[in-house]
Image (cartoon, grey):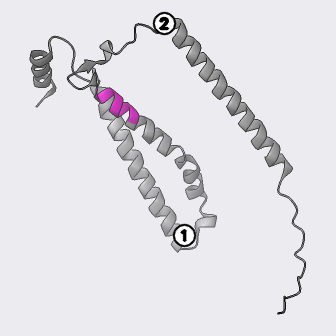
């Protein structure tokens, strides 16, 4: 069934409204997930091949790519979230409740702004504390190990 037929069917079943999700977001979210997943698999195979050939420590291009690959799961997760959330629009619960009907009348705009600001400031403070602690402990370096003392063997 095409989008026009789906729109007509939903209008007949649920009344007038726009029942088509954002196709651009759906199209590219799926592709971002699929392409990055393929990239991670290829990068893993490349790393396994380098490990097998015992050249992993000297493979500068692989190491550079591996550093940037750390961000791929986060981007894939965000693309999947966008695919899911935009794909279910305009519904909160399919056929029962639209997102436009899911707004709470008892929560004011000011309350939402205040709560989002408090959360943002809290996360900012935690991020700064995390950064300060990581830098402090990184600058200290590793503790110097004492040479192991010989312990006489126990005899029974």
| Mark 2 closeness class: few <14, some 14–19, many ≥20 residues within 10 Å | few
Q: Main secondary structure of the magenta part?
A: helix
In the rendered image of this protein, does residue 69 appear above or below residue 58?
above
Label 2 with label 1: CB-CB less than 8 Å: no
The front one of 29 and 87 is 87
Answer left or right for 35 relative to 87.
Answer: right
Res. 85 image quadrant: top left
Task: Give me the residue at 87% from left, 66% from top.
Answer: 145
Q: Tell which of 64 and 27 is nearer to you.
A: 27
**Which residue corresponds to mark 2?**
108
| Left or right: residue 134 compared with residue 62 | right
Residue drawn where x is 61% and y is 58% of the image: 60
Which residue is the site of mark 1? Answer: 51
- Give the extent of the magenta segment: 81-88
What quarter of the picture does the N terminus occupy? top left
Question: Percent from the top left, x then y, of residue 23?
Answer: 27, 27
Q: Residue placed at 29% from the left, 33% from the top?
A: 27
Would you say 84 lies left or right of 75 here?
left
**In the rendered image, the vertical position of residue 149 relative to residue 107, given as above or below:** below
> Residue 62: x percent and y percent?
55, 57
Q: Looking at the figure, which quarter contains the C terminus?
A: bottom right
């Amino acid at each position: 069934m095409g989008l026009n037929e789906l729109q007509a069917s939903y209008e007949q079943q649920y009344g007038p409204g726009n029942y088509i999700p954002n196709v651009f977001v759906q199209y590219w979210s799926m592709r971002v997930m699929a392409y990055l997943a393929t990239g991670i698999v290829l990068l893993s195979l490349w790393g396994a091949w380098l490990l097998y050939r015992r050249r992993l420590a000297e493979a500068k291009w692989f190491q550079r790519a591996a550093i940037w690959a750390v961000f791929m799961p986060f981007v894939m997760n965000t693309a999947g979230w966008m695919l899911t959330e935009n794909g279910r629009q305009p519904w909160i619960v399919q056929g029962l409740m639209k997102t436009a009907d899911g707004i709470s009348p008892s929560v004011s705009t000011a309350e939402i702004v205040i709560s989002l600001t408090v959360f943002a400031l809290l996360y900012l403070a935690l991020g700064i504390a995390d950064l300060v602690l990581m830098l402090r402990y990184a600058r200290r370096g590793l503790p110097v190990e004492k040479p192991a003392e010989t312990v006489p063997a126990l005899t029974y």
